[in-house]
């Protein structure tokens, strides 16, 4: 990410994502975050001033989560106490230190955008079938979010299906029109990036094109479920760390190279179903119960996840709207990350859902211990 941002600052192009050698224009990362960071470097330089501004911006974006959590909790009818608890948890919880506070990746911005879009969408769904202008604007906003983090696409599809199921019986024509306007807004927002990739790379890429590479790194001989512990495979097969692979990518072209890596991964999966299943299960477990910096940290993180699961169970009987939204996010977003090597930053865009549910469980425990408490 930062390599592409630095290249953008120096040349004005999104290119050369690999540290081992220049490989030309790229869609290895989505465009908006490296453009944002590259713009900072271009204005303030790549030295101490630029780095300080980048990290300050990352902290500011991460801090937005606390305020948005309060607003979302109140909008969902979860009560002032839960809203306040969620906001306080959001202010102090740090799921991926380098990502949240240093700004190396887009996770905090993706999380803030998803929170805002869920709030906006819930308010539209609760009030009425939106007018075409609002639906179109909502689609544009989702297009921007996807240009920051294409991994949010499954959440968009799932939430759209939920909204459509709620509104299709009430106002079929209005629901269809709203979906069409929203889709149009999103497609028009993505169109310049799609056109650029056709021209620069010679094929269709709406978000980013590195899934085949990541799938191959994560599923092959000697692969480990964890990114930090998958270093032998990374340093022998990743173009950023292994120059022969970068040379191969440069000669084949990025799209053809990633397609070949994807075919290699699928072949290995077919030939090693047991090992693939083992890796997938471990990645899924650690997505929800991540490894911490030490044993105590790991226990705390596990307790946080368990508290969030308990909160979701409580929402099933007390907050159907919140339960539906969180369940959809938890079912749709992580699926892709069960297939690739685990990293602590991958869950960051949906950490706010765990904070929300953990706040629900905490407030339930508080009420049971102090049943006469006034704030609910």
Image: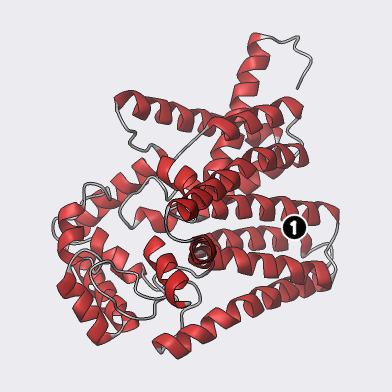
Task: Label 1: state its secondary structure.
Answer: helix
For the point 54% across and 46% down, the residue is 56
In this rendering, is residue 125 above or below 189? Answer: above
For the point 39% across and 71% down, the residue is 28
Categorize mark 1 by other alpha carbons within 10 Å: few (<14), some (14-19), many (20+): some
Judged left or right of residue 94, residue 352 is right
The percent coordinates of residue 296 (x first, y second) are 34, 23
In this rendering, is residue 189 above or below 84? Answer: below
For the point 35% across and 48% down, the residue is 343
Q: In this view of the protein, which residue sits in the foreground, 71 or 155?
A: 71
Q: Which residue in the protein does label 1 denote?
A: 166
Judged left or right of residue 295, residue 307 is right
The reply to whether residue 30 is visible in this rendering is yes
Q: In this view of the protein, which residue sits in the foreground, 4 or 71?
A: 4
Quadrant for the C terminus, please.
top right
Query: Total number of numbered labels?
Result: 1
In this rendering, is residue 95 above or below 216? Answer: above
The percent coordinates of residue 63 (x first, y second) are 60, 41
Q: In terms of image quadrants, where is residue 15?
A: bottom left
Q: In terms of image quadrants, where is residue 311?
A: top right
Colour option used: secondary structure
Q: In this view of the protein, which residue sits in the foreground, 29 or 263?
A: 29
Judged left or right of residue 375, residue 325 is left
Q: In terms of image quadrants, where is residue 335?
A: bottom left
The percent coordinates of residue 189 (x first, y second) are 64, 76
In this rendering, is residue 177 above or below 76? Answer: below
Quadrant for the N terminus, please.
bottom left
Q: In this view of the protein, which residue sits in the foreground, 326 or 206?
A: 206
The reply to whether residue 330 is visible in this rendering is no
């Amino acid at each position: 990410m930062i390599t592409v941002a630095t290249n953008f600052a120096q040349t004005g192009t999104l290119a050369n994502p690999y540290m081992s050698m220049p490989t030309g224009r790229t869609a290895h990362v989505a465009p908006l975050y490296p453009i944002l960071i590259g713009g900072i470097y271009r204005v303030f330089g790549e030295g101490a001033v630029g780095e300080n501004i980048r990290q300050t911006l990352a902290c500011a974006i991460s801090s937005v989560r606390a305020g948005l959590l309060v607003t979302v909790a109140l909008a969902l009818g979860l009560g002032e106490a839960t809203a306040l608890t969620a906001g306080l948890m959001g202010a102090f919880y740090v799921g991926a230190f380098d990502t949240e506070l240093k700004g190396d990746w887009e996770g905090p911005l993706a999380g803030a955008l998803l929170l805002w879009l869920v709030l906006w969408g819930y308010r539209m769904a609760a009030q009425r079938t939106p007018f075409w202008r609002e639906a179109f604007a909502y689609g544009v906003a989702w297009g921007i979010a996807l240009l920051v983090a294409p991994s949010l696409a499954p959440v968009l599809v799932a939430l759209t299906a939920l909204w459509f199921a709620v509104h299709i019986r009430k106002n079929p024509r209005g629901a269809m029109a709203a979906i069409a306007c929203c889709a149009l807004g999103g497609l028009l927002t993505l169109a310049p990036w799609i056109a650029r990739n056709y021209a620069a790379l010679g094929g269709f890429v709406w978000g980013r094109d590195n899934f085949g590479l990541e799938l191959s790194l994560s599923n092959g001989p000697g692969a480990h479920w964890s990114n930090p512990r998958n270093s032998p495979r990374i340093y022998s097969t990743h173009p950023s760390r292994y120059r022969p692979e970068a040379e191969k990518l440069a000669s084949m072209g990025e799209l053809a190279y990633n397609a070949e890596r994807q075919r290699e991964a699928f072949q290995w999966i077919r030939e090693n179903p047991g090992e693939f299943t083992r890796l997938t299960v471990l990645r899924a477990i650690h997505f929800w119960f991540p490894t911490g910096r030490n044993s105590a940290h790991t226990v705390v993180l596990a307790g946080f996840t368990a508290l969030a699961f308990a909160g979701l169970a409580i929402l099933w009987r007390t907050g159907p709207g919140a339960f539906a939204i969180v369940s959809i996010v938890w079912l749709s977003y992580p699926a892709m990350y069960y297939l690739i090597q685990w990293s602590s930053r991958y869950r960051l865009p949906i950490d706010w859902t765990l904070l929300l549910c953990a706040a629900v469980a905490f407030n339930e425990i508080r009420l049971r211990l102090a049943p006469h408490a006034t704030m609910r």
